[in-house]
Image (cartoon, coloured by chain):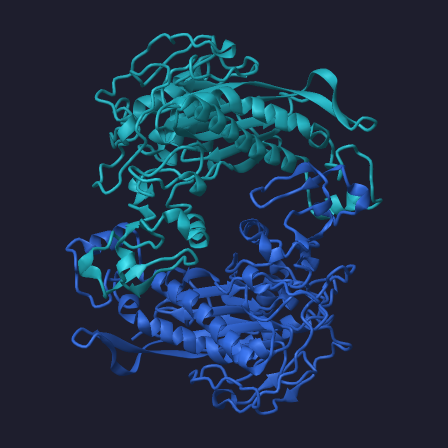
Chain colours: A blue, B cyan
């Protein structure tokens, strides 16, 4: 397996060992201000915590962290910051052991201590409010996933998951019920990813809470297992499949705008979450005194369309979701609506929590790699929002196709490609895009060649 | 304009006048049992209230109802029942007047008493628990829609809806905010459809409540306005566009299965809605005593995938959503999760209400008719679930294409086609489908030729 990624933190391909989450002493992570735009104007493409004065790419040797699995070499592109960067990444081999339910003592037994099923794991975490949550997620999520997969491995490796994990049918038509519901092995992997994200979120809440730290991060994870690629996303990173004649989007972004109805609905169910300080309704702009009594455009939680309403005094409050596009903020504070962490995050100078509005659950897309007639140049590009703010899917695909076609022999071509993608967000090598837009955000990219991710890899 | 539809109740093309909703005396509608399957086995394709002993199509003259706009001729196909059938339909011209906001007195004034904007309207209502709700919806919804459209007509006919209905800018950059949000005239029509469904639901709740009657219905509405076709759906009816080389699905079905996560989430937020009688969790089958302590497959509101959980006593309760496919029921009672009415509906022998779980809001799809290079044979087929239970989209498209190609000169060909589609659900003319499946449900069909629905029709 060969994969290119920048900023990278450890050697791809190695096994992912157990994490040692940083305690308050081992990782004195400073708390940074979260992405914040309450009441401010618009400064496109920039977020407060990640803007840098100089976008020149710098290579620095990694300053060693104490985590053993992270002690390989690291190469930092596109950051002058310390290794405690808000963008974090992890990748490696996923080794899953086989456990079995001991019927006699009703305990789980590890019956196969050696690795039973192997896969590959790639993850990008884009932090806000400091790097603490992103670092913890990079150190923890793969272990959560391994545990969750081991807990259901009997079902994952069966043709069809059994109704009971012990395999014993309580009801003779159990297999028929499972079949009628259309439950497949891949549904258990999706379930394991969903549970792993939740478990990791709990760990971050506990660890950062104990350390008196805050912050959160988005998470984009790709897992190659049994001939399928699972892409799980909670936040505004993105993964796309680029082939010679096709671009396939493998993730959706979760922002206050894309999740407007879910967020407004929660405020409708629990108005106390807004503490009388915000209005649930969406208007084209924030209303002011002159609007009182007028009929203005608005949208509520149940509406996809727009209508008009007569403005009342309560409509003049700050909107639950405000701003458009990259400037849209939840409760004037946060630019994403899914992710990990943020357990302590509150609206500035208030006691209003953001966490109830945030989901740690990812949306999971499954790509049946074995069903694709894969070419050498077919790759998945995973990147944090810094890339997609500047380059469209089509521009990325064009860069991928141009570079890979011309560099078929280079053994480091996927790493080089990742570097080129990042350089294109820095106003360098922008001939391909022709627009010369620049990203002031952190940018992290994985380029994953799919050609070896089919049935040949992993397995048991 | 020419459209074919069966069972039809009045002459298509005429204006839709104001409704006179039936009071308790004018419409002594009997209360029928709702679709009910609690604890029963599976009897595919049949629902209790609509099963008939004989599927022979019968033509009966309509027994006159007192509603003036419904006093045209009626032709009943596929029913031996009275005109108080659970399937109801309505269609006609939609005449919208222009109103304006009088700034002086802050009142709405009708400045254009003549019709200002015209469109066409088609609606199918599939009732349950008796025909009362479906009859009321057929008599009421178009008026609600007309009112809602008239209330925003200034925005609907503008290039871009104004921030304020009076057209006066409170803030000089108002048009820019509306543009940044991407709000278009069609969003106001979508909003009007959403509001009209809600208003009609309120009317049904009030009228049936006052009459001591119950029942509900699904609603599928198509509106042709200003070169666009809007399809609004709340329930399990379906509309598709059939062209020579294309089938485009214009609606999604809303059933306890397709809306599982929304329904489970509501029960998570408000567990008191289940009164301790139901479990929110989904299992492949209803659990029993033998399952206690075992690890079984399950899904909760936040999960798209499946996982295993150890069965507790509370998991043995009846599931909130139970059964698969056509047999899936909400609270053991209802096969649909969106629609109008059902304000009084309770789980048999309990006080547990279904209404909190039901949405009256439709999903609206917009078809830009003016952007399609329309052919004579391009039609929209709208039908209640009785048709789609038996015929796939592809089979319907095949029947449409075969018939229309061979009958280009017949002036009644769209009506004939609607009849053929229904016959195909009755085990007649089944050569085209080759499967000979039979529907025991009511079946209602509209066939709407699109060729004259572009800019030429309607307008102001």
* On screen, residue A333 above or below A126: above
User: Which of the 4 image quadrants contains residue B4?
Assistant: top left
Give the image location of residue B6, x and y in percent.
Answer: 40, 19
Q: Residue at x 55, y 77 (%)?
A: A209
Residue drawn at x 58%, y 92% as measured from the top left: A64
Q: Is the residue A446 above or below the residue A310 in the image? A: below
Left/right of residue B430 with respect to residue A144 in the rendered view: left
Q: Position of residue A280 (x, y in %)?
A: 63, 50
Q: Is residue B451 something one can see in this rendering? A: no
Q: Quadrant of the N terminus of chain B?
A: top right
Residue B223 location (% of width, % of height): 56, 27
Residue at the spot x=56%, y=49% of the render?
Answer: A268
User: Left or right: where does residue B195 sit relative to residue B337?
Assistant: right
Residue B60 in sight in this render: yes
Count of numbered labels shown in the rendering: 0
Q: Between residues B177 and A73, which one lies in front from this camera angle? A: B177
Instruction: In this rendered view, identify the residue nearer to me: A284 or A203.
Output: A203
Q: Is residue A189 above or below residue A16?
A: above
State which quarter of the image contains the C terminus of chain B. top right
Q: Quadrant of residue B81?
A: top left
**x and y, in percent, of residue B100 in the image:** 76, 25
């Amino acid at each position: 397996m060969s994969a290119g990624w920048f900023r990278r933190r450890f050697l791809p391909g190695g096994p992912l060992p157990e994490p040692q989450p940083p305690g308050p002493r081992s990782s004195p992570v400073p708390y940074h201000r979260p992405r914040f735009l309450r009441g401010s104007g618009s400064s496109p493409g920039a977020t407060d915590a990640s803007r840098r004065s100089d976008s020149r790419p710098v290579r620095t040797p990694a300053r060693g962290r104490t985590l053993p699995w992270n002690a390989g070499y690291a190469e930092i592109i596109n950051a002058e910051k310390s290794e405690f960067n808000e963008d974090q990444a992890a990748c490696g081999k996923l080794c899953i052991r086989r456990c079995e339910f001991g019927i006699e003592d009703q305990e789980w037994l590890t019956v196969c201590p050696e690795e039973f099923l192997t896969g590959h794991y790639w993850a990008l975490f884009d932090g806000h409010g400091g790097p603490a949550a992103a670092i913890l997620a990079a150190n923890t999520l793969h272990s959560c996933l391994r545990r969750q997969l081991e807990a259901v491995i009997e079902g994952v490796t069966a043709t069809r998951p059994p109704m009971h994990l012990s395999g014993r049918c309580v009801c003779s038509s159990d297999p028929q019920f499972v079949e009628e519901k259309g439950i497949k092995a891949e549904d258990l992997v999706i379930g394991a990813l969903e549970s792993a994200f939740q478990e990791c979120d709990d760990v971050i809440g506990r660890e950062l809470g104990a350390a008196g730290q805050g912050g959160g991060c988005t998470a984009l994870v790709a897992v190659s297992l049994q001939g399928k690629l699972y892409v799980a996303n909670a936040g505004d990173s993105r993964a796309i499949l680029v082939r010679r004649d096709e671009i396939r989007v493998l993730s959706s972004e979760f922002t206050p705008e894309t999740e407007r109805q879910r967020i407004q609905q929660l405020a409708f169910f629990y108005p106390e979450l807004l503490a009388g300080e915000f209005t649930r309704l969406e208007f084209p702009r924030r209303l002011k005194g002159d609007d009182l009594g007028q009929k203005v455009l608005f949208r509520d939680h149940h509406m996809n369309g727009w209508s008009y309403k007569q403005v009342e005094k309560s409509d003049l409050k700050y909107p639950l979701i405000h701003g458009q596009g990259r400037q849209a903020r939840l409760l004037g504070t946060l630019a994403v609506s899914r992710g990990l962490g943020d357990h302590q995050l509150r609206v500035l100078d208030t006691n209003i929590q953001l966490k109830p509005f945030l989901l740690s659950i990812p949306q999971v897309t499954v790509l049946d790699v074995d069903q694709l007639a894969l070419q050498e140049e077919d790759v998945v590009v995973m990147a944090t929002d810094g890339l997609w703010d500047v380059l469209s899917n089509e521009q990325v695909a064009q860069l991928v196709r141009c570079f890979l076609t011309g560099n078929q022999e280079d053994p480091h071509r996927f790493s080089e490609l990742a570097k080129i993608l990042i350089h294109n967000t820095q106003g360098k090598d922008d001939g391909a895009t022709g627009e010369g837009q620049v990203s002031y955000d952190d940018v992290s990219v994985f380029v994953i060649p799919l050609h070896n991710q089919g049935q040949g890899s992993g397995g048991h």
